[in-house]
Amino acid sequence: MIAIEQGAQQVAQGYAVHQIYQIYRILPEVVLTITGVLIMLIEPLLPSRASRKPLGGLAIVGTLAALIASLWQMSLPAGTAYHGEVRTDAFSVFFHVLILGIVLVTLLTAVDVFLPETENTAEFYALVVFGAVGMCLMTSAVELLLVFISLEISSISTYILAGFRRHTGKSTEAALKYFLLGSFATAFFLFGIALLFGSTGTTTFAGIAAGLPGTATPAFAVIAVAMILVGLGFKVSAAPFHVWTPDVYEGAPSPVVGLMSTAPKAAAFAVLLRIAFEVCPSLHVRWMPLIWLLAAISMTVGNLGALRQQNVKRMLAYSSIAHAGYLLVAFTALSREGIAAAIFYTAAYAVTNVGIFAVVSHYGGYEEKLLSIADYRGMARHFPVLGGALAFFLLSLIGIPFTAGFFGKFYVFSASLSAGVLWLSILGLVNSGIASFYYLRLVTAVYSQPASEAPAVRRPGWALQLALLLTVTATLVLGIFPGRTLAMARAGAATYAPSSAITGSLKAAGGVSGAPLPVTPLHAAGQ
């Protein structure tokens, strides 16, 4: 009896240790969930007239704790948890850090922009944190139904955040359009999952990859991938699934636009990379023409649409469509370098764009009265810090050297040229030239002679100053010392990319060895 009891205790202890070890795999999501719940529980206990900014501080602290947890995960060996539905590896950790960094800057911006009397700010902080849970879980999920649930957690939060300013008609219109079109795109994604399950009998990434080559219904598998591309194409604003983007960007609060234009896109691109190179490698020949077409249309439609815009947020909306096209160019390389370039470009675009919207959010204020390009005339003279930061971020989007955008585009086009995708690379370079026109038009307005007195813009608080410091520093670091970030990107890409020769141009520019990089343990990527 004593031996049986001791054996039972050992089994129980082993099970408890196993459960704790599994929680380590989703530790950032657990921290974010606890933070969001605490915000919702504390808010009703505060006096009705009390400021909700301390709850914003709580959200910032929770996000920092989740960021630390993500960095700590690099010390874990790569592996799965919860019956193989969640995987922690260099790929997921990279995107966790990126998404949580974006969420941190968004919260800092919102704390500065939202006035004390602004309604429902506690709900705003909670929704941002809960949305981050879905985005982070998307990047580590390796089972399609879990990806779908994570996508919905993220989407529902952003649907509500888009209509946060309920007293304005444009904000309500933005939320309604985003919800209706987003639900329609989600239906495509879910139906694609159903077809893949019908073709392979499983929804796990590894099971689908093993079952696709021998499936009895290859046509269903191709249609399924196309439908999944439709669903994810909507999330990343790729043409022709972009029609919601300008109206939603214009109507949603600027801090929300800064979030939705970067973090959900990063999560969606992470899922797309996993599906394209881990789930469906046997279908490359069939789905690659779709990627070519999406990339070409997105770059062209986005840049041509931005040329006609006088509203800064609508211009940046079309710009985001074009940048989705640039990123898709990297997919066409079908190599580890292509995946690494896509990961690096996602980070470069995210840190730049979230910084732009931090400036736009503060300059326009909560009511967003300064949105036309003419309103930015003379901005640098009246507000040199805001004007200089905005101009710097715009130059990064153009791809000027010593900025993150330069190396982002360099790696993308180098990978595509190495793969022989010449015409798409040329089209991308032509579109980059077109984009320079409307970016420089705004830079010119910022540094022009002011046509009137300075608008009523509050002095930036500590939160916005910290947000700008973080984004400017990240843009500079990625533009001057890209090698470390590229090494982490390549470590994540090594798990999913087909074997290919490493391009000499990337080695020369990034200063990173072309030898295969290990994926376990995770801390190897950060050394």
Image: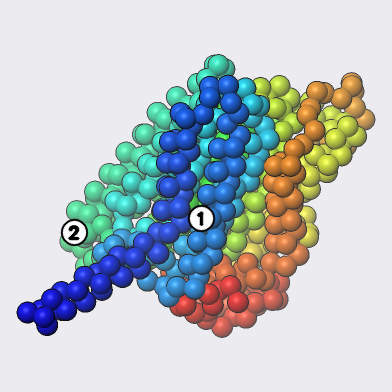
Farthest residue to the right: give it: 449
As rendered, which of 110 and 472 lies closer to the eye?
110
What percent of the width, then of the height, locates residue 158? 48, 36
What percent of the width, then of the height, locates residue 251? 57, 25
19 shown above or below 183? below
What percent of the width, then of the height, locates residue 345? 61, 57
Circle 1: is it few (<14), some (14-19), or many (20+) Cα within 10 Å?
Answer: many
Please report the residue visible at 35 percent of the width from the left and 51 percent of the height from the top. Answer: 147
Please report the residue visible at 48 percent of the width from the left and 27 percent of the height from the top. Answer: 175
Q: Which residue is mark 1?
A: 66
| Image quadrant where one finds the C terminus | bottom right
What percent of the width, then of the height, locates residue 164? 52, 26
The amino acid beneath tag 1 is Ala
Please report the residue visible at 70 percent of the width from the left and 57 percent of the height from the top. Answer: 474
How far apart marks 1 and 2 lie (CA) works out to: 35 Å
Q: Residue 380's mark?
A: none
| Colour option used | rainbow
> Is 452 on the left-hand or right-hand side of 20?
right
Q: Residue 201's mark?
A: 2
The secondary structure type at the circle numbered 1 is: helix
The amino acid beneath tag 2 is Gly
| Res. 447 image quadrant | top right
> Is 448 on the left-hand or right-hand side of 200?
right
- Asked if residue 319 can be seen in this view, the reply is no
Which is in the foreground here, disc 1 or disc 2? 1
As rendered, which of 402 and 524 lies closer to the eye?
524
As rendered, which of 515 and 157 lies closer to the eye?
157
